[in-house]
Amino acid sequence: MLDLTNIRAELEAHYDLSPSVELAQQMSDIHARMDRVMPFPDWAVAAPYVAAINRLKAERGAVILAHNYMTPDIYHGIADVVGDSLQLAIEATRVEAEVIVQCGVHFMAETSKILNPSKTVLMPDMEAGCSLAESITAEGIAQMRAQYPGAMVVSYVNTTAEVKAASDICCTSSNAAQIVAAMPGDTVIMTPDKWLAQNVAAQVPQKRIVWWDGACIVHERFTPQDLRDFREWHPGLKIIAHPECPPDVVAEADFAGSTKHIIDWVGDHRPAKAMLVTECSMASNISDAHPEVEFLGPCNMCPYMKKITLEKVLWSLHSMTGAVEVDAAVADRARLAVQRMIDLSRQLAG
């Protein structure tokens, strides 16, 4: 666990992190990307951290990869690359910087390290885990293989390196249906998200899909009644759900897709009112790009994603601590599964 008291004292000794109206005004171009969701007084608090991180990032030759679920100050203020799991996995193979700071959860940092074994990958808080990733182990994969001999194992990228290494190929919510459909054989094992697997099964009826009993604590809390209530309260509301939601929730939505697909759908359709049935920061991060859209609740917040803060990012770059390591043998096998996903995704897209 990070010792935030000592970390703050160390940072304050090296950087002026006091709230600054003057600095906030000087950095108004950055604030303009998020002013609908971050009032100016809050920006005056965040601006000194953003300025310090961006200076230190240049000095360290670092690049920051940020997931769509990061808070707006990270997403808009310091990130060099933003995206969903697939986008970040692909971009991790393209970065030239020797230092990668992963603003997301631990399995994402592991994926970046797997794809960039010679680079330093920093995790601002090692306790930023994932309930879904922690629901499955390599032993669980072995159990599924024994139960369904010969079936290919497709594992969500929301898994540990050990689970990726035990799988045939990875997938994300963006490409899960296409990956599963391309697998040989009649039966495909999907781990660890049962709801994603069931939603994919509806899209790929030609395959028998069996799944591990895991779920995301953010997405499984939504109910069909939540969606029906909001439709009643807000006529004309368009509802967009993530495929980690249960199938009965997805069935109530106007559209279901990955975080990237959700962003694209909002941009293409520009509804007057929209409800994103996913993690809270999604709507915050795209709201300024679509001022004509009124984003409504409910949303659920991921407690793991929110462990990543500006303060912790600054500390990771200042101290160069929190380096993620993956056993070389495990990384080699996991890299095959991730690279197969990337290669097949590109092939299917082409």
Image (tube, helix red, strand yellow):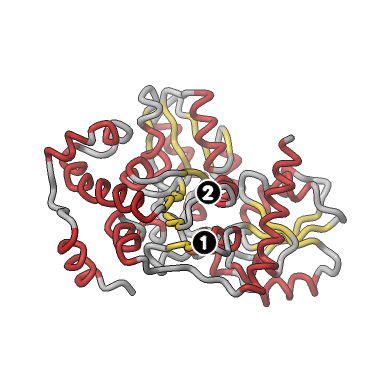
Closer-to-camera residue (204/99): 99
- Which residue is at 57% across, 47% downward? 94
Q: Which residue is the site of mark 2?
A: 95
- Which residue is at 48% across, 38% downward? 228
Image quadrant holding the N terminus, namely bottom left
Q: Quadrant of residue 20?
A: top left
- Looking at the rendered structure, the kind of residue marked 1 is Lys
- Image: 195 above or below 231: below
> Dot 2, how many residues are within 10 Å of its Cα: few (below 14), some (14-19), or many (20+)?
some
Q: Which mark is residue 230?
A: none
Looking at marks 1 and 2 on the same chain, the residue that comes earlier in the sequence is marked by: 2
Q: Quadrant of residue 166?
A: bottom right
- Image: 191 above or below 89: below
- Looking at the rendered structure, the kind of residue marked 2 is Val
Residue 291 as seen in the image, left or right of residue 239:
left
User: Can I make out residue 241 in this image?
Assistant: yes
Circle 1/circle 2 CB separation < 8 Å? yes
Q: Position of residue 97 (x, y in %)?
A: 48, 52
Q: Secondary structure at mark 2?
A: loop
Q: Which residue is the site of mark 1?
A: 119
> Dot 1, how many residues are within 10 Å of its Cα: few (below 14), some (14-19), or many (20+)?
some
Residue 290 as seen in the image, left or right of residue 211:
left
Q: Position of residue 272 (x, y in %)?
A: 42, 23
